Image (cartoon, grey):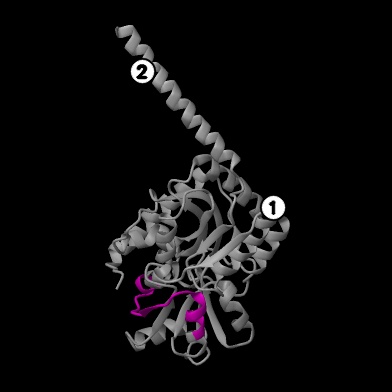
Amino acid sequence: MMKLQHLVHRSARLVAAAALLGATVAAAQDFPPQKPVTLVVGFAPGGAADAAARLIAKKLGENIGQSVVVDNKGGAGGNIAHQFVANAAADGSVLLFGSVGPLTIAPHLMKLSYDPFKDLAAVSGGVNFPNVLVVHKGAGAKNLAEFIALSKKKPGSVDFASTGAGSASHLAGELFNQRAGVDMVHVPYKGGAPALQDLLGERITSYFAAPPTAMPHVETGRLIPLATTGLTRPAYLPNIPTVAESGFPGFEALNWYAFVAPGKTPTPLLERWNKEIVKVLNDPGVKEALLKHGLTPQPTTRAELTAFMKKESTQWAAIIKERKLTAD
């Protein structure tokens, strides 16, 4: 009798294993998805995230022979889009151009209805870039030293725009407040484009902006660049000093975007998307186009992206705690 029960249990396990293997194989074969692929972006059209996503989506679509549509879901510093994808169909048809804010900063600032490390699955790194601190031409500062002096002369009267509470531009500004000993007021927006519009209209003083959105206006003289937020000057902005070299050693606040998917997406589909995205990011034409926009391609394995996100999460958690920041 015991032997019979053992055989029955063993047979059940084999059937379950076979079913799992069959589902895995089916998931791997069901690529590209039999419906248009949606690449969700958490910010309004016209910003750096949107520009990069559309460029990459176009090449992805060409490579897989399937339409890849960019869907902008701006608001709440990108958290609306991340929540949407966390609850989206896990069939490989939905990807998210996730960002540093919702993935590694917002969880330490506010209560979210999703867990970036459980409800979203790492696919591949995307692009990274430093922010550039810019002011409008009537701000009264032509370099970082003058800007700091202005901020200290009128505490609380100088403000800075961001793409939302918990975004990279927000934390860059808060880190600058801490290191420079100033008290700039944070003004969140729903994306880079509306923030830039108010800066150009001189309704806001400064903005830790993405280079692709800010530099065209720097070239026309409407905006003044004060410093970039990487440790070294990027090759495409050789004449703009870094905050680090301007008296604040070690200052670094990079912005980055990475590809993630709904957390329950089958591993074979995640691996296949990783392969396709890495291929696009390594494409010479795509790399050249991204670099012209001031965006550095950052293709990774899924494991590398997960490790990078955890490192960033730990770093920003410490700063948020030290600065006693909230989402308000």
Q: What percent of the width, then of the height, locates residue 102? A: 41, 61
What stretch of residues is rendered in magenta?
Answer: 176-197
Q: Residue furthest right?
A: 285
- Residue 35 counted in the magenta span: no
Left or right of residue 99, residue 216 in this image = right
Helix, strand or loop at label 2? It is: helix
* Residue located at (52% from left, 87% from top): 200
* Residue located at (40% from left, 58% from top): 104
Mark sitting earlier along the chain (1/2): 2
Give, as a three-letter code, the residue at label 1.
Asn
Q: Spatial distance from mark 1 to mark 2, Cα to Cα?
A: 46 Å
- Residue 182 counted in the magenta span: yes
Residue carrying label 1: 63
Q: What percent of the width, then of the height, locates residue 120? A: 43, 51
Q: Residues within 10 Å of mark 1 (few under 14, many from 20)?
A: some
Give, as a three-letter code, the residue at label 2.
His
Query: Residue 223 sits in which quadrant?
Result: bottom right
Residue carrying label 2: 9
